[in-house]
Image (cartoon, rainbow, N blue to C red):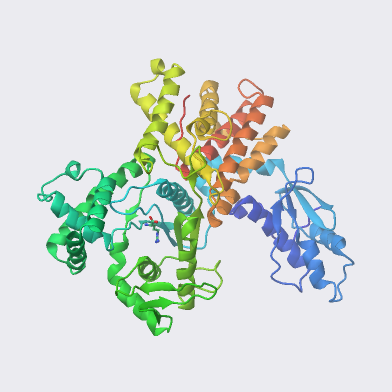
């Protein structure tokens, strides 16, 4: 039985802020304060529990008992302590019943009317009211980041897809996100590229992209010249000096190469609907001397074999910040970029997406920044940096994914192929007759690109996964195709009912009489805590799993509960609409365009 503490009533209208889990935790926080007033700052430990016990469980009693048992407490063990916590829970319309299990777990079963009311409120006030609240204003997501004049490979595709999702989740949480494309647009290779441009295309200033042709081939050819011809090599080395010295002709040629490259990358971003703001390595170049000066003054930089380095405890090889030839490198640029992001852009959380192979690089310069006092020692505290690593994309042969003809996969072709296959499937299903050509094209695009994204995002990012069109385009199982169809089916149920949801919202109510309705309702309510978990732990697969389970819960509900024409029609249409709204928000956060018709 619940007890009222003071005038506090949790779960009432004004207290609706926060995720379900946070609201339950708030109740337990109060109960804990009342139960053990001499133990302040006991964080409530609350988690969903197996359905046979209830909906959520508080696990504080056992740990707390260990803390207080030798302090002359009135309690005789963890279970009585758990019972006391339970009876000190403040009165709340959230809770239907509580129980004690095992050595002091407190189980809570949520009240159906409260769950129903909360879903109804989301339908009227919008899904934004279920967004996570993060304690930061500004974040940098450093993602995609291909290298100029080189082909963008599947690793960059993963970085783009995962990075975009994380950026979307942060944006949904009202964080200002600086979406940074840290392109590799600076370095000694530009000497050879510029020199090759002069040689191959003397009228390069007037030439168009076609004349430059395939940039990867261009890169390869210039590298061959560089390796084979000492005269060329010397001119290339001189060209770097001229470029870095700011000579106009060299600057222009560099800009030209970057633009051509950028236009190629843009084709991929355009297809994926991903927005990025380029601040390449070249941007941070002027900030490197100042940054190294700061680190030097803190005594972090040492001399080693002609290079300037930072030694990192536990690592055999130091972080090189000035090469022995006096040039800067990847690490010097990243240190300057970090300085810039912290001090000029006031970013509180800086998130980097690259394959797991670069983990060491990030660990090392993060450690250097921590030693410089730029970041707190506790890596969960802000300002904070996180390296979001991911595994490889494999081909059917279990090796790194590449096509037969080219060394790397052309991403534009890969995305186009997914779209083409979807188009074929749509036409085969006879939709070419009912739909306009534009509709067919837009649907094929949404499903095809969505499938590629989802196949990537649904895996734990740290693992490798196999790229397989047949699997990702299957309309059964955990695929975007299945989920997009599920969403379209819900929309069609609502359409076919002939009822106007907006109108129903004015007076209609929701109740969750059938057990499958309650399961679906509770799952909908858990959206906020799932997004928060996926976002703060940087694992988009958590959201994918939620979305897939949601559609399974919906299917069970729809199989067992008649919607249209039933006595509960209004209420059940609300459940359909709420499911569609939450699914759409999941799609949106995953960068997938929803479809409404199948
Ligand atoms: N250009 C790099 C690559 O292709 C990725 C850059 C990642 N970002 C960074 N700040 N280091 O591997």
Tell me if residue 125 can be seen.
no
Q: Quadrant of ligand 1?
A: bottom left
Q: Residue at x 43, y 81 (%)?
A: 300
Could you say where residue 55 lies in the image, as x and y percent from the top left?
73, 46
Measured as percent of width and height from the top left, residue 534 is found at: 56, 51
The residue drawn where x is 37% and y is 54% is: 145
Query: On the image, which quarter does residue 572 sit in?
Result: top right
419 lies above or below 157: above
Q: Does the rendering let one see residue 180?
A: yes
| Rendered residue at 79%/46% (across/down) | 53
Q: Is residue 505 rendered to the left or right of residue 63?
A: left
Looking at the picture, tell me which residue is in the foreground, 308 or 56. Answer: 308
- Residue 514: horizontal and vertical position, in percent? 72, 31
To which quarter of the image does residue 236 belong? bottom left
Q: Is residue 149 above or below residue 557?
A: below
Q: Give the residue drawn at x 39%, y 36%.
A: 404
């Amino acid at each position: 039985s619940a007890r009222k503490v003071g005038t506090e009533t949790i779960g009432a209208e004004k207290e609706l802020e926060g995720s379900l889990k946070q609201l339950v935790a708030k109740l337990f926080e109060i109960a804990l304060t009342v139960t053990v007033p001499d133990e302040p700052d006991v964080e409530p430990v609350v988690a969903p529990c197996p359905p046979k016990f209830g909906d959520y469980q508080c696990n504080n009693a056992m740990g707390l008992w260990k803390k207080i048992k030798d302090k002359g407490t009135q309690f005789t063990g963890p279970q009585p302590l758990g019972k006391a916590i339970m009876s000190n829970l403040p009165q709340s319309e959230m809770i239907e019943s509580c129980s004690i299990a095992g050595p002091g777990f407190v189980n809570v079963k949520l009240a159906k009317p409260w769950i129903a009311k909360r879903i109804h409120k989301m339908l009227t006030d919008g899904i934004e009211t279920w967004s996570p609240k993060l304690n930061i204003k500004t974040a940098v997501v450093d993602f995609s980041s291909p290298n100029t004049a080189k082909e963008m490979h599947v690793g960059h595709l993963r970085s783009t897809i995962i990075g975009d999702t994380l950026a979307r989740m942060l944006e949904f949480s009202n964080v200002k996100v600086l979406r940074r494309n840290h392109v590799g647009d600076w370095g000694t290779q530009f000497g050879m590229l510029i020199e090759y441009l002069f040689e191959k295309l003397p009228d390069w200033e007037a030439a168009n992209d076609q004349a430059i042709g395939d940039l990867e081939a261009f890169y390869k050819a210039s590298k061959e010249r560089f390796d084979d011809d000492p005269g060329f090599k010397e001119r290339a080395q001189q060209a770097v000096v001229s470029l870095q010295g700011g000579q106009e002709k060299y600057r222009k040629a560099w800009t030209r190469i970057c633009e051509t490259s950028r236009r190629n990358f843009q084709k991929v971003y355009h297809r994926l609907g991903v927005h990025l703001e380029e601040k390449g390595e070249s941007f941070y170049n002027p900030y490197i001397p100042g940054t190294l000066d700061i680190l030097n003054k803190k005594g972090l930089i040492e001399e080693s074999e002609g290079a300037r380095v930072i030694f990192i405890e536990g690592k055999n090889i130091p972080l090189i910040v000035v090469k022995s030839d006096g040039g800067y490198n990847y690490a010097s640029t990243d240190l300057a970029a970090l300085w810039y992001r912290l001090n000029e852009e006031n970013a509180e959380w800086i998130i980097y997406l690259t394959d797991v192979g670069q983990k060491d690089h990030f660990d090392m310069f993060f450690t250097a920044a921590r030693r410089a006092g730029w970041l707190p020692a506790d890596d969960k505290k802000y300002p904070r940096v996180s390296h979001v690593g991911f595994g490889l994309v494999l081909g059917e042969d279990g090796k790194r994914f590449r096509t037969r003809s080219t060394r790397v996969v052309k991403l534009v072709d890969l995305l186009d192929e997914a779209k083409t296959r979807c188009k074929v499937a749509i036409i085969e299903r006879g939709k070419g007759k009912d739909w306009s050509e534009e509709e067919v094209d837009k649907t094929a695009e949404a499903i095809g690109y969505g499938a590629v994204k989802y196949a990537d995002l649904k895996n734990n990012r740290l693992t490798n996964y196999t790229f397989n069109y047949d699997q990702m385009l299957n309309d059964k199982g955990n695929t975007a195709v299945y989920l997009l169809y599920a969403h379209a089916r819900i929309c069609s149920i609502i359409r076919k009912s002939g009822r106007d949801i907006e109108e129903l919202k004015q007076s209609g109510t929701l109740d969750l009489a059938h057990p499958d309705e309650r399961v679906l309702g509770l799952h909908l309510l858990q959206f906020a805590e799932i997004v928060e978990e996926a976002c703060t732990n940087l694992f988009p697969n958590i959201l994918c799993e939620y979305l897939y389970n949601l559609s399974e819960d919906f299917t069970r509900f729809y199989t067992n509960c008649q919607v249209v024409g039933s006595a509960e029609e209004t209420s059940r249409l609300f459940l359909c609409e709420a499911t569609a709204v939450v699914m759409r928000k999941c799609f949106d956060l995953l960068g997938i365009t929803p479809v409404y018709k199948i």
